[in-house]
Structure formats: C-alpha cells, structure tokens
Amino acid sequence: MSLIDTLVGKPLPSDEESEQKIGVFLGIPTLGLDGLGSASYGPEAALTVLLPLGILGLACVGPIMLVILGLLLILYLSYRQTISAYPNGGGSYTVAHENLGAKWGLVAAAALMLDYVLNVAVGISAGIGALVSAVPHLQRYTLTLCLTTLALITLINLRGARESGVLFAAPTYIFVASLAATIVLGIFNVIRSGGHPHPVIPPSPLPEPAAAAGMWLLLRAFASGCTAMTGVEAVSNSVTAFREPRGKNAEWTLTGIVVILGALLAGIAYLAHAYSIGAMDQTKPGYQSILSQLVAAVAGRGVFYYITVGSILAVLTLSANTSYAGFPRLCRLVARDSYLPHSFAEVGRRLVHSVGIVFLTSLAGLLLIVFGGITDRLIPLFAIGAFLAFTFSQAGMVVHWLRIMRGKAKDTDPRAKRQAATGLTINAVGVAVTSVALLVIVIAKFTEGAWISLVIIPCLLLLFRAIHRHYIRVARQIHATKALRLDNLEPPVVLITVESWNRLTERALRFGLRLSPDVTAVHIMTANRSDPSRPRAEDDETLEEASERLWEKWNKAVIQPAVQAGIKAPELVILDSPNRQLYEPLLMYIETLKMKYPDRIIAVIIPELVQKHWWEIVLHSHHATGLKAALLFRGDSQIAVVNIPWYLDEDNEEVSPESGSSKGR
C-alpha cells in the first residue's frame, strides 16, 4: 500500500457516490460545526467589545443576544425557503446567479469564499484558545498547534465526506450534551439561589467601568456577536450532500442546527450575566475563555470540566469542517461556469473535490500565520462575507418569488399563490434585516480590519473575470468550424535527444522510425567532465575522443543494422556546447530544421527515465523536464513534443556495461 493510500485511503469508484451521502444525524456534525462552534466565540466576541463597561457590560449582552437570536430566526425561515426552492443546492451563488445575474452571483461567491476561509482560521484559533485556557503552558505554541490541527482536518476531509462526518459526530454530540448540562445546571443554581448563584470557582474579576454604554459601543458589540450566525447557510449550499429525500433531510438538519445554536447562545448569555463572567485578553498570560470560566463556575474543575472543555476544543477546531464541506462545492459551481480553474470541478480519488480542499487549507494556513493564530485578531474580518452572502441570497429569493407570482398570475390555485406570497414576505424581511446588519458590521468593524474584506472581494471579482475571459478566448480559438483537413499529411521530421547509446535511446529511435523515415538524433557535447549524465570513458578523455567513441557506437549499433534492414539510417548530430548549455544549442538546431522544412512538423522525441520510488527522484537529473518546458513555452505550433518514458525496474534483463545503459545516470 502506498503512502497516499495510507493517509487518504484507496480510490473510490464513481458508483459508490450514493454511499457517501449523509442523513440528519451526520448532517449536523458535517455542516453544523461552524454554527454550533460559534456559540463559544460569538458571545465572547461581543463581551470583548463590552470590556470597557466592566460589570455594566453584562447587562447589555442579554438585549444584544436577543436581537441576534431574532436575526437567526429570520435567517432560518429564509433558508428553509431556499432549500425548498432549490433542492439541488441553493447557496448564495446559485440563487443570486439565477435571479440577479452573473455579476451579483460572483459577488455572493466571493463573499462566501472569504467567509469559508475565515471560518477555518477563526474556528481553529478559537479551539486552540480553549485548549490554552485549560493548559496555559501551551500558550507559546498557539500557532504551531493551529497549523497542526489544520493539517489533520485536511487529511480527514480528503478521505471523504462521510468519513469526516462519522469522525466528527462523537465530539459534536458530546459538546452539545455537556454544554446543555452546564446550562441546565447553571440555570437551576440561579433559580435555587434566588438569582445570586455562588460559583464553584469564581471567574476573573471584571474591571471598573471605563466608558459609558453609548450606541456606538453597543453597535460594535452587536457586530462582533453576529459572528455566531456564520455557517447558517452551509446546509443550503450542500443539499446535494444528503441522501434522498435530500430536501427534507437538509431542512431537518438546518432545524436541528438552529435550535441547538439558539438554545446555547441564550443559555450562555444568561449565565454569563448571572455569574458575572466577562471576556479576557487572549494575548495575556492566564487567559480564560468565557466557556472555560462558565463551566468552572457552574461545576468546578473536575472531570466534567475537562470533558466539557475537551469537547469545546474539539468542536471549535473541527468547526472548520463546515467550510471543508461547503467551500469545495461552491468552487465546483463557480468552476463549472468557467470563473475558476476547471480543476476545481473535478472529483478526486475519494469522491471529494480535492483541489478545493487543498486550496482552502493553503489560504487558511496563510491567515493563521499572518495573524499568529489569535482569534481576536481574526474576528474583525469575520461576518462581513457571511452577511454579504446572506443579503444576496435573500435578494435573489425575492426575485425568485416575484417571478413565480407573475408566472402564476392566472393560476386559480390559491394555495400556490399563498405559498409564493409567504416566501416573498419571509425573504423580503430577510434581505432588509441582513442588509441593515451588514451595514452595521461594516461601519463598526471597518477600522479594526474589516476594510481588508472590502478589498479582497473586488480582487476576487477581477480574478473571476480574468479566468472567464481566458476560457472564452480558449473556446473561441479551438472551436472547430470546418471539416477535417486531409492535405499536407507528410510525415514529420523527427528529432531525438540522446545522451549516449543506451536502451532509452534505442526505444526512442524505434518509436521515431515508426513516425517518419527522416530521423535525426542530437547529442549535446559539453566540457563539464564532472557531469555524470554525459558519456565518458576515462577522466583524461578529450571532447574529440568522446565524440569519436560515440560515433563508433552509433555506426555499429544504429547505422549498420539500418543498412542491413534496407531502411534510411537515423542521422547523428553532435553539437558542441563549451558553456555547458543543454537547451540553447538544441533550440538553435531546431530553428535550422524549421528553415529547411518550413512545411513539415518537427517532432521532438525526448526519452526520459521515470523513477519508481519517490526517493529516487533526487538521485537523477531532470533535463528532460526542463527541455519539455523550454519547447512548450516557445508557443511554436510547428513543433510537437513527444515523451518516451523508460521505467526503472521495467525488466530484469542484464545489460552489458558496453551498452552504456547503466552509465551516465
């Protein structure tokens, strides 16, 4: 078994794709980890902004969270409409592209891609933040732990969507159960104590108020808290990941995610106020996350604490899996429309879009390195992409319902009219609310780094357009408008590069003679005696003697057998290269052939040694690869490049040293 099979798994046949589909039970951990994990860093992000208010900030977090829960409800109803209308996958890109036009669809795609990348970085950094809370000695290894976690999540997702869901199911449901138990126990303690619970381990004291609760501060706290809603769209983006009936399975999965998330957000906000738990600076020693302080205050630092914090760590770090489920599928749709490289639309060995997964990992890893794996530094960039995608999705659905209502103006079925009118109302409210929230987030977070998002999205749009123009130009150039041309079918002039007389050269010559009687072998004679790839007999052999020895071998091994067989013998040309250049003399000789045969194709045959083991690659020169690149990048349509491989260990036949097959490599 190869290394890639061990790490990623053996390739899956295409007919097993249906077996990789998921249901509701696996759908929640596969597509809901982003939303569920945001229950930890959403309230904490809001409380971090409210730190200048001290204990007064706790009185504000409840109303802010109520507004966020109302917005979450509107998004839930809106995306249920989207799933129903687009059972084949109705993410922001699809909805906006079909209803608002290609330009707005690309804006939605760019925003959503940005959100997916940030979700990976924020989720992993928040998870490692939870680990550092439990084990403070690990704080100096924050970035290393983030990048290691990113690599592990990537490997898991490359193994397939179903496997990732199965692996993530246990930590997801332990997370939900342990936090639910914490919230229930905490609420019970609050009720039993008459609203003044006694924490088992007191949280860190809150600072004295240093500012007033102004509207601007509250808007900034709301903007930060809105990060708790990222990931809500993931289910509508990935409806095709569900087994039949996929629409119903997607709707129930979305319902489960939103209900759990809403309950966690409300419970955390309520208990944070009841136990006087505020945010702390993650960059300073002794940092404790909101949830770490909350669990310790409710249940102490026993076994339950470490189980809960461990599940929080797992879910936060694994919440990146939502992006790994959605980002490659989004890239596939955009690539299908030729706005991204077509390789993004190809299915990999494990029936997942591997190119999208690797690309997502690269971008998220870069973000983690730039921002040092600190959640608070990444939060200001978060939520803008998500809410921009929310807005365009809702706007697209408004146009969708209007189109249906116009098309059914003469329809006498009142039920169909009511359904369209209900959908229009829900999505109209959704677009209004998400637009206002987006505006607040942009204004509140602009100076904290949100401006970067507003620069990245236009850059992505320019990239999409450039890629699309390239594919249009390619399609226009290769489009066949005429019948097959049957004139000027003269055999090509064959040129073969040779290093010495060996079995690679023999194979290339045999292939060349099948193509054309006009075969020329070219050898570059350099003055570099230390180069083992050049044929040498003795260290004191001159260039003239080396040339003469090659001529003798060529006459005996090539010319004489050709004459006896009655065919035109391949010509040997030896080009001198005193400056040890391998490509330039050959390219100049090809130019002379082009002038000699202006109406014929020049077929350049390049024999190449192919290594069986990865470690053998470093033991051999790769002049053949360089020559291929030099020829192809010339863009000369008169030149055709043919590669003739010789695989190491192809056979076990002994070859005498005189043949030269074991020399020069």
Image: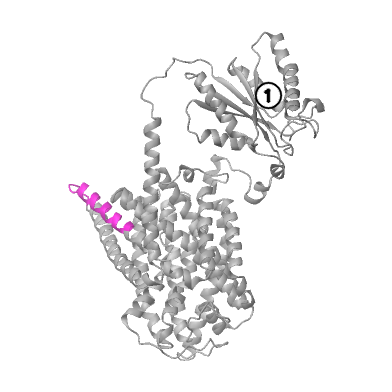
Which residue is identified by label 1? 507
Residue 406 inside the magenta-drawn segment:
yes
Query: Does residue 18 lie above or below 327 as drawn?
Result: above
Q: Which residue is drawn at 52% across and 44% down?
A: 347
**Residue 658, located in which quarter of the rendered image?**
top right
The N terminus appears in which quarter of the rendering? top right
Q: At x 41% / y 81%, what residue is drawn?
A: 50
**Looking at the picture, which amino acid does disc 1 mark?**
Arg
Decide if residue 79 is in sight here.
Answer: yes
Between 259 and 287, the one nearer to me in the picture: 287
Comparing 191 with 326, the one in front is 326
292 lies above or below 476: below
- Is residue 272 rendered to the left or right of residue 2? left
- The x, y position of residue 373, in whole percent, is 54, 68
Q: Is residue 66 magenta?
A: no
Bounds of the magenta segment:
392-413
